[in-house]
């Protein structure tokens, strides 16, 4: 994996092809990332079309048929209230995606802006980074729990909590990128022709570090999804009867010995989704931003 | 590396290890000496530690500031009340060996036992009883102070005589004096501990009961040790009047039903008071667990804040009462262990009358829809009814234990079927009690163990004097208040019984609440616990574990 990207990097300068084609080719070489991308694509489809594909309304109860194994009516079996696990899994895909995307987008926007400001203005640097250090002093998950506890349980506060707890990482990452570009010749040149700070930051520095930010965000996505599911598992995230996967595992825990299948499906889905995003993120990193790859 | 070892060496090594393990396994048997003088009764282990499990922890043991069933259970182990009820409901002596009642039923004189000591060694006198009542009646926020009615005086006449004088008769007086929150406390202990008394921060919470609290880690475990001087257990209730026949008791908090059963099966917990029916199959297959089927315990109900939207409209309360399928709740959430309730008071309990079933609102979604139409809430395409552009939505506040949570989700689904959008607000017990006391609820679900407390519990829940706790309903009706007062003061038993019927009628007619199930509990216990007549902490007024023995 590393060898391939290194070789590619050497070739990069002489290649006349567009960088995206190049990146795509690099990605294709990495089998895990292709698998990741395909699975993510399938999951995205699930999230978009899932609610139209369900066999039963996800919250519809059928108590005489509770805790049943798979059947033609209920392909994945039923839960403790006789709800269709298959339909709930499908409906849950959208929730997990939304929670992951919204919280990471929040962290991305806020973190990038703060990171650029910190990197660009030495006067602000100390203030912003010391605040970031304070936040980094708490384990991220503990910070997320504390934020949910303060905001009250629910999906909105879970997204806010996961987002806020990821902000410091984005700030650090973007700041270091900005620092590396700030003193380079092309920035000096832009400054020399009289460009204003805002223009330099957002038209010249930001596009250059975009690939790193995207890679980082993809990798954070899997962690954000896992955090959101964990918070729901603890009863702090999605509230009943929302078919959130983490919350489904939490309920199923009580029935683990009697009906293990109930816990199996949502756990499997969380596992697949997180793994797929990790594969994809690794692949993207190798393809877009070879400098970051593990050696 | 292994290939270099010859096979014989490996076999010898395995044999040595296996032998060692075998020897280790046999060792305790070898050490056991049947003639051991430390064990006078070979059959039972008087030094045993019994581990019990419960689902929820206790936030406070300040007995004058809580009605939480687990707090009162704990006090039953740690303390004693003046009197008690036996299995058949007869009044029997406990700390008071005798008593006299004045001619008009207003003066109560108690003659105390003279051999009672607290865990600290302090001897019980009438001054402790006086101080207990003083605190009970005056403690700020005491949810039970009003139970005694208007009290004219409390007085320690001499060291072993205590007198209580009421301003008006109180039919429930014996139930209240025998209740576990009527435990007698040590005044000097309270004074010494100050504000920390009754909390985990206290060094010691002194009582006269058969077990002394020696360690308390909230939401984890309470550890008790035997009170060796205890000899005053009522012989009408217990074969053994004391001291207890086990040395130590650990009362652990294990919130998950499935985990409690796992521990029971693993033998790390000896007694679980609330085995879920779903796990019963596994218990039946187990050699080491016995169980007692379905002991009547409590009534679970839905309550409305009757002065808050949307439940200030009686039609909506009635509609919801008809939308609730109690049979489904009993079958699914309670796994068939409990029966659907047709009245608040349950059969077999004082005050119950068969007439009460007539007032029950049957499950009838069509009727519920009719009532909602009548109230002006129109059906819409997305299923949630609307009125004046507002959807019919509200929040149910519920405890977070497994059974309550499952019930809550069913209520939600059942309400949705008639076009009501019910949100859930699920809380752990301390937060829930606080939430209700702060009057933040629209509707709530809860259970109450009536037991020896008797039907006077109706007054608790519906008398305006009892707001904000335990009266969390805010249902106000003059006739109801008169009846609640009457049932307490009338000397005529028929009139009293008739009052209960009328109270049930009014409350069901206006749907101030919906009794949902009469809850029963299954108790699972390790076969080492020799006496299956283990006290039931929930229903019975007594829970002292004096007869509990652990087999060797």
Image (cartoon, rainbow, N blue to C red):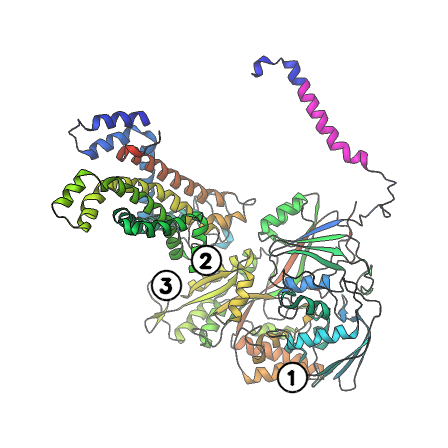
Of A141 and B406, the residue lying toward us: A141
Q: Earlier in the sequence, mark 3 or mark 1?
A: 3
Q: Look at the picture and state if B1 lies above or below A139.
A: above
Quadrant of the snapshot with the N terminus of chain B: top right
Magenta: predominant secondary structure element? helix
Say if labels 2 and 3 share a chain: no
Which contiguous range is marked in magenta? B12-32
Of A240 and A8, the residue lying toward us: A8
SS type, badge 3: loop
Judge depth for marks 2 and 3 and give the one in front: 2
Q: Look at the picture and state if A267 lies above or below B445.
A: above
> Tag 3: Cα neighbours inside 10 Å, few (<14), some, or many (≥20)?
some
Residue for point 74% across, 56% down: B534
Of B205 and B321, the residue lying toward us: B205
Q: Which mark is residue A228?
A: none
> Tag 2: Cα neighbours inside 10 Å, few (<14), some, or many (≥20)?
some
Q: Kindly indicate the quadrant of the structure image that contains residue A282.
A: top left
Q: Which residue is mark 3?
A: B383
Q: Kindly indicate the quadrant of the structure image that contains residue B359.
A: bottom right
Q: Where residue A144 sits in the image (x, y, percent)?
A: 43, 52
Q: Look at the picture and state if B433 lies above or below A73.
A: below
Q: Which residue is mark 2?
A: A149
Q: Which residue is mark 1?
A: B486
């Amino acid at each position: 994996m590393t060898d391939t990207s290194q070789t590619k990097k050497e070739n990069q300068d002489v290649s006349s092809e567009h960088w995206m084609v190049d990146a795509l080719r690099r990605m294709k070489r990495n089998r895990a990332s292709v698998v990741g991308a395909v699975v993510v694509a399938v999951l995205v489809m699930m999230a978009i079309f899932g609610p139209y594909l369900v066999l039963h309304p996800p919250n519809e109860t059928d108590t005489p048929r509770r805790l049943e194994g798979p059947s033609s009516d209920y392909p994945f079996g039923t839960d403790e209230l006789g709800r269709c696990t298959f339909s709930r899994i499908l409906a849950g895909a959208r929730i997990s995606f939304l929670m992951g995307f919204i919280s990471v987008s929040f962290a991305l926007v806020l973190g990038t802006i703060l990171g650029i400001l910190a990197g660009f203005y030495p006067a602000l640097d100390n203030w912003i980074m010391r605040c970031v250090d304070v936040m980094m002093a708490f384990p991220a998950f503990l910070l997320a729990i504390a934020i949910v506890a303060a905001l009250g349980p629910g999906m909105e506060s879970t997204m806010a909590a996961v987002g806020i707890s990821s902000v410091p990482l984005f700030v650090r990452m973007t700041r270091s990128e900005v620092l590396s570009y700030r003193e380079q010749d092309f920035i000096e040149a832009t400054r020399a022709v009289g460009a204003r700070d805002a223009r330099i930051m957002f038209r010249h520095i930001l596009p250059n570090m975009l690939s790193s930010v995207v890679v980082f965000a993809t990798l954070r996505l899997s962690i954000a999804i896992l955090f959101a599911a964990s918070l729901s598992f603890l009863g702090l995230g999605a509230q009943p009867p929302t078919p959130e996967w983490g919350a489904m595992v939490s309920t199923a825990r009580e029935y683990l010995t009697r009906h293990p299948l109930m816990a199996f499906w949502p756990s499997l889905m969380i596992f697949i989704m997180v793994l797929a995003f990790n594969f994809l993120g690794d692949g993207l990193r190798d393809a877009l931003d070879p400098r970051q790859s593990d050696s | 590396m292994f290939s270099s070892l010859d096979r014989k060496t490996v076999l010898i090594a395995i044999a040595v290890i296996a032998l060692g393990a075998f020897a280790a396994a046999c060792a305790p048997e070898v050490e056991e000496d049947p003639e051991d003088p430390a064990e006078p009764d070979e059959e039972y282990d008087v030094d045993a530690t019994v581990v019990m499990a419960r689902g929820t922890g206790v936030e406070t043991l300040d007995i004058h500031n809580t009605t939480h069933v687990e707090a009162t259970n704990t006090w039953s182990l740690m303390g004693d009340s003046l009197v008690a009820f036996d299995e058949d409901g007869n009044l029997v002596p406990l700390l008071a060996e005798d008593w006299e009642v004045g001619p008009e039923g207003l003066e109560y004189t108690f003659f105390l036992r003279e051999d009672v000591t607290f865990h600290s060694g302090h001897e019980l006198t009438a001054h402790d009883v006086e101080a207990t009542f003083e605190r009970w009646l005056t403690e700020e926020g005491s949810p039970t102070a009003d139970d005694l009615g208007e009290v004219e005086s409390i007085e320690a006449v001499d060291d072993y005589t205590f007198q209580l004088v009421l301003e008006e008769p109180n039919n429930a007086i014996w139930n209240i004096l025998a209740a576990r929150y009527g435990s007698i406390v040590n005044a000097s202990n309270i004074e010494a501990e100050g504000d920390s008394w009754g909390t985990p921060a206290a060094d010691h919470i002194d009582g006269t009961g058969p077990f002394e609290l020696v360690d308390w880690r909230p939401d984890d475990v309470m550890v008790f040790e035997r009170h060796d001087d205890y000899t005053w257990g009522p012989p009408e209730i217990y074969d053994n009047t004391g001291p207890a026949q086990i040395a130590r008791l650990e009362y652990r908090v294990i919130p998950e039903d499935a985990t409690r059963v796992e521990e029971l099966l693993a033998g790390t917990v000896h007694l679980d008071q609330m085995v879920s029916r779903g796990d019963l199959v596994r218990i039946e297959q187990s050699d080491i667990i016995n169980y007692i089927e379905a002991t009547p315990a409590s009534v679970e109900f839905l309550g409305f804040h009757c002065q808050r939207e949307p439940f200030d409209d009686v039609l909506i309360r009635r509609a919801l009462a008809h939308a609730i399928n109690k049979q489904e709740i009993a079958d699914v959430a309670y796994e068939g262990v409990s029966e659907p309730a047709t009245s608040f008071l349950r059969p077999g309990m004082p005050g119950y009358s068969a007439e009460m079933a007539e007032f029950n609102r049957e499950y009838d979604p069509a009727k519920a829809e009719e009532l909602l139409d009548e109230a002006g809430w129109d059906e819409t395409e997305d299923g949630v009814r609307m009125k004046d552009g507002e959807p019919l939505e509200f929040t149910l506040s519920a405890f977070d234990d497994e059974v309550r949570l499952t019930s809550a989700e069913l209520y939600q689904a059942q309400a949705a079927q008639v076009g009501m959008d019910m949100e859930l607000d699920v809380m752990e017990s301390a937060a829930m009690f606080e939430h209700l006391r702060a009057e933040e609820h629209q509707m709530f679900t809860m259970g109450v163990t009536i037991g020896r407390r008797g039907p006077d519990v109706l007054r608790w829940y519906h008398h305006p004097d009892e707001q904000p706790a335990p009266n969390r309903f805010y249902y106000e009706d003059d006739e109801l208040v008169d009846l609640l007062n009457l049932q307490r003061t009338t000397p005529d038993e028929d009139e009293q019984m008739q009052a209960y019927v009328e109270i049930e009628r009014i409350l069901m007619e206006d749907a101030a609440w919906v009794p949902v199930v009469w809850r029963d509990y299954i108790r699972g216990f390790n076969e080492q616990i020799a006496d299956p007549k283990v006290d039931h902490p929930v229903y019975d007024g007594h829970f002292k574990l004096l007869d509990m023995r652990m087999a060797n």
